[in-house]
Image (tube, rainbow, N blue to C red):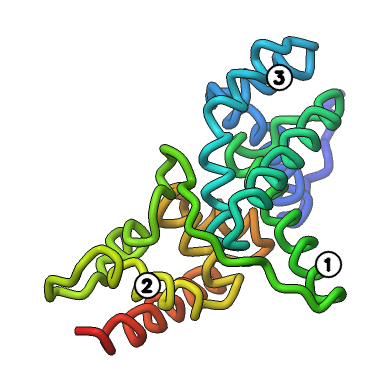
Amino acid sequence: MLIVLPRRSSAERSIQELQLVSQSLPNLYLADPDVQLMLQVARGDTAAFEALMLKYQDRLIGFFYHLVRDRTMAEDMAQDVFLRVYRSRERYSAKARFSTWLFRIAHNLASNQRRGLARRKEVPLGGNADVGNSNYSNDENLAEKSALMPTRMIDSRETRDIVREAIDSLSERQKTAVLLHKFEGMSYQDIGDIMDLNIVAVKSLLSRARRRLKEVLERHI
């Protein structure tokens, strides 16, 4: 006897295809060596956690320093991120690259910190402390990576003041997007995942940031 199976509708086929894609997505991230380290952390490997801290500590401190302009606060915030990572280790699931997941935690922490400061009507103290040997070692790097440094020669102190003025003129969201894009080398998709934005919004944010940096820096050319 011939059994005729009912044909699936196009909608049913599309749903099944999306489910298959969704199920395979985590496998894409397992090739990330930092994801593998974090999975080891989830199994109780403290050496793996120390390796991740060593790799990302200066990067997180630099990221926070450019947002809060206070070395001590930046160090405390970086430590807080690692505490959150460690406390959530048993619930960890590889749903993104490790750096994307880590900086999402950092971004959320920075957002909460800003809201707390706003409620207390406080502002972070400016500081000239070195931020270590990370990619964020000085403000000039941010403008250089954005290809927006003034072309005329000016002394280093004046350069720092000019670039700091330009960076601090950005909104916090613009600054965050620029730091992630230029220093962390993240894609629009990664930045969107971290900041909960779509790709079009990320591109618009970076475009406005570049225009603002250019406006401020051109005053000194």
Image quarter (top left, top right, bottom left or bottom right) of the C terminus: bottom left
Q: Earlier in the sequence, mark 2 or mark 1?
A: 1
Which residue is painted at 64% across and 50% down in the image? 74
Which residue is painted at 66% across and 11% down in the image? 47
Which label number is shown at residue 39?
A: 3
Q: Say if mark 2 contacts mark 1, CB within 8 Å.
A: no
Which residue is painted at 52% across and 48% down in the image? 62
Q: Residues within 10 Å of mark 2 (few under 14, many from 20)?
A: few
Nearer the observer, 128 or 131? 128
User: Mark 1 highlights which residue?
Assistant: 116
Which residue is painted at 56% across and 73% down in the image? 201
Amino acid identity at mark 2: Asp
Q: Say if mark 1 contacts mark 3, CB within 8 Å.
A: no
Left or right: where does residue 5 sit relative to residue 160? right
Amino acid identity at mark 3: Leu
Provide the secondary structure element on which disc 3 rests: helix
Provide the secondary structure element on which disc 1 rests: helix
Picture coordinates of residue 27, whole percent (x, y): 62, 27
Q: Is residue 101 visible?
A: no
Q: Residues within 10 Å of mark 1 (few under 14, many from 20)?
A: few
Instruction: Find residue 51 and report its image quarter.
Output: top right
Q: Which residue is most to the left?
A: 152
Left or right: where does residue 216 sit relative to residue 195? left
The label nearer to you, 2 versus 3, is 2
Nearer the observer, 104 or 153? 153
Q: Earlier in the sequence, mark 1 or mark 3?
A: 3
